[in-house]
Structure formats: C-alpha cells, structure tokens
C-alpha cells in the first residue's frame, strides 16, 4: 500500500524543511513525496534539493500559477494507491500513515470507496501547540462509532455515509474535511479530475464535495495525526486580509455550477443550496462581522447577497435583521455583539435540529 504525499509550496523556506522531514519520519515508509514549487523567490528550492531521498520528486513552475492550479500540479505527479495534500508549513506526526494504513487494511474491498480524515494539533510559527482542529460536530453529529476500528488503533473512529455528510456540508455550506488530514484513494481523485474546480481561495472545499459524490463513506479518526500551523502568511491569514469577498464569490459560484448529480446524491434542490448560501454566508457571516465591529464588511456582504439572490435575501429573517441593524449604527453593532453570544448560538442549535429532521 503506497501513499502519495503531495506538497504545494511557495516561499516557505522557513517551514518546508520541517514539513518534508515530518514525512520522512513516518513509521510506515512506503510513500512518495511530490512537491510542486510555485516559482518561489526564496531559498525553498535549495532546501528541497538538500534532501537526498529518491522518494522525493519535485517540479518548479516557471511562473506563479496560483494556489488552486498548484494543488492540481502537485496531485498530477501522484502514483500511489492513496493520496493526501500537505501544506508546506504543516507537519505529519510519525504515526499518521501507519494509522491510516491499519484502517484501510481492515476495510478490505471497501477501502477504495472511502475518505479518511483526522483530528490535528494547531501549532504556531515556533512549533508550539495552541489548540486542536476537532471534528465538526454539526457535520458529523449522526456519525457511527466504529468499535472494531476504535479497538484496532486504540482511539475513537467515526463513520458517516457520503450522502449524509454531503447533505450536511451543502446545507451548512462547510468544508467536510480538514485540508491537511484528508486521505483518499487515487481512483476517486481521478474520477473527480483533481482539486481545481474554479474556486478562488478554497479549492479543497469543492474537492471535498466532489469526492463525497463518488465515495460511499467517510471516516474520522479522533486522534491528532497532523499539525496545522497558524502564522501571518498562511492561507487562512491571507484569506482574512482579502476581506472575505473572494470567499463569497466562491460560494456564489458553487450555487450555480455544483452538478445536479451531487445535489441528487445529497437529496437537496438547487434552491435549498441557494437558501443555505444566503443563510450561512450572507446573513450569519454578516451578523458576525457586524458584531465584531466591521460594519463595512458586513454591508459589503449584504450587498453581495442582494446583487446575487434578491428574492432569497428578502425571504430570510436573519438577512432582514442584518439590514435593520446596519441601519441602526452603533446600536445595531451592540445588538449584533449580544446576538453573537446568545442569539446566534440559539439559531445554530435550531439549524442543527432542522438538519436532523431533514435527514430522518
């Protein structure tokens, strides 16, 4: 059983060496490391070349082709049975591949129809742990506890049908998996034509949806097998600096070009997907930003929703509330702050109950 660890890189000379070494330190050694350097201007390439291991293969882009296309470049080099995408500032813990191998081995013929993911440590630029990336309870709330797998690896393992996880991912407009911990058969990757599906900043989210469209089941390992690094220059930080509008463009485009076959598998209509976009990405995000004092961004988000789906906006209670609070100035901001701590948690609980009813 061979694993392909795909690493996209751009100007991460500070971290790329540690990332490569974390893969080389795996207790399971049947893997390849595939690095696509996106025309780095620092010493990244020299650091990559300093590793003398035949399992490391890399190519250098002549120009910076962007984040999404570079994921596709890295993935295109894979020849293993199973693949994962590891950012060049993140780390694999030593038992990551061995744990995934044990689970896959026990699944027999089912192993080529499943997706695996896990918990991860959150570390800072100094390798200090500051938190965890946990299981998303709202997406996985109906998951089954896999007792045999739990006993096998001595940590909890949960499973959920691809249909159910895809449905919840659509209705909550969320990424079903953690980017760095997601492992999948190469045959499923090839079926969905790799990572890049036109997204500006979150190609892994659309890729996760597409994977669920061809998979049968997803598994979550409740053990930290990776370390996700937070610092001022990582993808999440860059996303925040862009004012979140690119995120909303991605979500809007998804409401248009998500395939009908995916909606059918998730048992939802396109209108339900549109309503989820308005609820989650316009109304709730707008209220969140307003409560944080960023009324300008909240207003931009509301206007974006009005420009894309005015009828759906006018039917959404929270969007109407956002409009009123924006017109109320500082009073509206104060109310939004209170809603963040009290009202939004209530709404989220109601959303979860609704999802449970829809799935039964």
Image (spheres, rainbow, N blue to C red):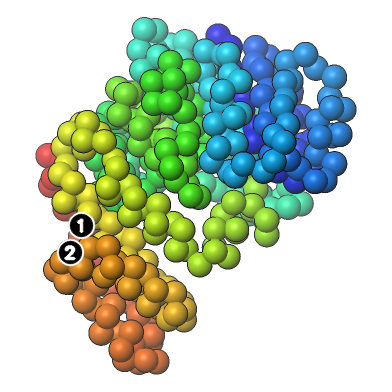
Asked whether residue 284 is in view, the answer is no
Asked whether residue 334 is in view, the answer is yes
Compared with 281, 228 (above or below) is: above
Compared with 156, 231 (above or below) is: below
* Quarter where residue 322 is shown: bottom left
Label 2 neighbourhood size at 10 Å, few (<14), some (14-19), many (20+)? some
Q: Is the C-beta separation of discs 1 and 2 under 8 Å?
A: yes
Q: Residue 133 appears at what percent x and percent y?
A: 51, 46
Identity of the residue drawn at 72% across and 25% down:
58
Looking at the figure, which quarter contains the C terminus?
A: top left
The residue indicated by pointer 2 is 312
Q: Residue 288 appears at what percent x and percent y?
A: 39, 71
Q: Residue 339 appears at what percent x and percent y?
A: 32, 76
Pick the residue in front: 265 or 93: 265
Compared with 234, 167 (above or below) is: above
Q: Secondary structure at mark 2?
A: helix
């Amino acid at each position: 059983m061979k694993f392909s660890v795909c690493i996209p890189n751009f100007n991460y000379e500070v971290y790329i060496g540690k990332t490569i070494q974390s893969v080389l330190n795996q207790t399971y050694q049947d893997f390849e490391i595939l690095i696509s350097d996106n025309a780095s201007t620092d010493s990244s390439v020299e650091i990559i070349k300093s590793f003398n291991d035949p399992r490391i293969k890399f190519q250098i882009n002549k120009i910076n082709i962007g984040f999404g296309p570079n994921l596709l470049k890295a993935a295109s080099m894979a020849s293993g049975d199973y693949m994962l995408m590891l950012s060049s500032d993140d780390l694999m813990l030593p038992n990551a591949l061995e744990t995934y191998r044990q689970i896959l081995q026990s699944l027999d013929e089912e192993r080529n129809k499943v997706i695996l993911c896990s918990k991860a440590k959150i570390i800072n630029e100094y390798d200090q742990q500051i938190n965890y990336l946990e299981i998303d309870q709202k997406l996985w709330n109906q998951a089954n506890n896999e007792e045999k797998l739990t006993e096998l690896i001595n940590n909890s393992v949960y499973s959920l049908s691809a249909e159910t996880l895809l449905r919840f991912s659509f209705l909550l407009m969320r990424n079903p998996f953690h980017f760095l911990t997601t492992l999948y058969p190469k045959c499923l990757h090839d079926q969905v034509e790799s990572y890049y599906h036109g997204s500006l900043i979150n190609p892994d989210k659309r890729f996760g949806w597409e994977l669920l469209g061809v998979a049968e089941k997803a598994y979550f390992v409740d053990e930290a097998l990776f370390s996700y690094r937070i610092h001022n220059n990582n993808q999440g930080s860059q996303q925040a600096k862009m004012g979140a509008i690119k995120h909303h463009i991605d979500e809007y485009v998804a409401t248009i070009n998500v395939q009908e076959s995916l909606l059918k598998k998730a048992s939802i209509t396109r209108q339900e997907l549109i309503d989820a976009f308005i609820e989650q990405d316009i109304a709730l995000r707008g209220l969140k930003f307003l409560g944080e004092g960023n009324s300008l961004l909240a207003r931009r988000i509301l206007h974006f929703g009005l420009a894309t789906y005015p009828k759906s906006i006018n039917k959404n209670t929270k969007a109407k509330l956002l409009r009123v609070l924006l017109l109320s100035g500082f009073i509206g901001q104060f109310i939004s702050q209170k809603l963040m701590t009290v009202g939004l948690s209530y709404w989220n609980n109601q959303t979860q109950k609704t999802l449970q009813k829809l799935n039964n």
